[in-house]
């Protein structure tokens, strides 16, 4: 059966939780962190809400990545205890974040098989946000780098960032698609920038990336699929 869209599309593809697992490791680290704070008069839900707020604040000043995440853990701890963390406590908190960095890259189902096929028919550009060094390292360890004609690691994925990437790579908006699992960073800003989008559901998408998915403006296309493998039906 022929693909719905002809060869020659430009596919901007997200990395974390689209190509490989990512947030599940953060969730495990957070669970260990909450267990560590079990002596405090706060419920696990209250600790999580406080951490979410600490992350929002830290991201504004330090961006994304493990360094920022570690700072959020310490800031949350100090806010909940109303005291500065000792060096021993900071070392324990850093160990939770370090556990994330030690994981092997776990590709999501269908990625290893389908990505080479997509690369043979279309132009693939990796578009992710976060720490330049961390994201580049994950891509290198994933074994997927050869399938992309370009890699864009941006500080934030908003409409302006998509517009810059489109201009830099001379993308035709009508045949350019952003593919990812985050409504907040992958889908809504890409649609706002005049692109098409494909939302791939991931049950463990980071809470701070949740948002209502916007409707596609007239002349643009939004598709929702349940797995990376389903992209083969369209591209």
Image: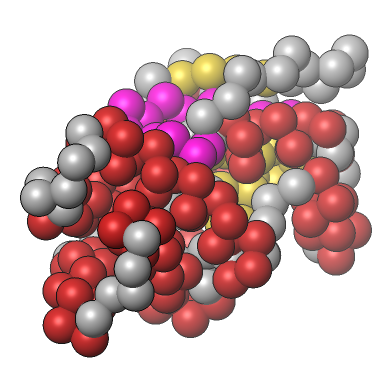
Answer whether residue 206 is magenta in the image: yes
Q: Residue at x 75, y 47 (%)?
A: 158
Q: Nearer the viewer, residue 39 or 139?
A: 39
Q: Residue at x 23, y 50 (%)?
A: 30
Q: Residue at x 79, y 55 (%)?
A: 161
* Residue 61 in sight from this viewpoint: yes
The x and y percentages for residue 150 are: 64, 68
The x and y percentages for residue 146 are: 46, 70
The x and y percentages for residue 210 are: 52, 30
* Quarter holding residue 92: bottom left
**What's the magenta region?**
196-209
Farthest front residue? 82
Q: Nearer the viewer, residue 16 or 205?
A: 205
Specify the quadrant that holds the C terminus: top right
Q: Left or right: 210 with respect to 17? A: right
Q: Residue at x 31, y 35 (%)?
A: 46
């Amino acid at each position: 059966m022929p693909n719905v869209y002809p060869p020659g599309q430009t596919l901007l593809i997200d990395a974390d939780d689209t190509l490989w697992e990512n947030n599940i490791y953060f969730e495990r680290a957070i669970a260990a962190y909450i267990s560590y704070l079990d002596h405090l008069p706060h419920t696990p839900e209250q600790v999580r809400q406080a951490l979410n707020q600490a992350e929002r604040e830290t991201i504004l000043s330090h961006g994304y990545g493990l360094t920022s995440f570690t700072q959020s853990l310490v800031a949350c701890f100090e806010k909940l205890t109303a005291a500065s963390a000792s060096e021993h406590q900071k070392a324990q908190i850093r160990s939770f974040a370090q556990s994330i960095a030690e994981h092997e890259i776990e590709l999501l189902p269908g990625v290893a098989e389908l990505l080479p096929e997509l690369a043979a028919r279309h132009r693939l550009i990796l578009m992710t946000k976060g720490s330049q060094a961390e994201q580049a390292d994950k891509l290198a360890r994933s074994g997927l780098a050869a399938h992309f004609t370009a890699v864009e690691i941006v500080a934030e994925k908003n409409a302006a960032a998509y517009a810059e990437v489109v201009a830099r790579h001379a993308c035709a908006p009508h045949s350019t698609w952003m593919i990812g699992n985050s409504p907040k960073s992958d889908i809504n800003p890409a649609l706002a920038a005049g692109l098409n989008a494909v939302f791939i559901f991931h049950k463990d998408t980071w809470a701070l990336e949740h948002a209502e998915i916007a409707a596609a403006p007239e002349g643009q296309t939004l598709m929702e699929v349940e797995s990376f493998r389903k992209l083969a039906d369209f591209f």
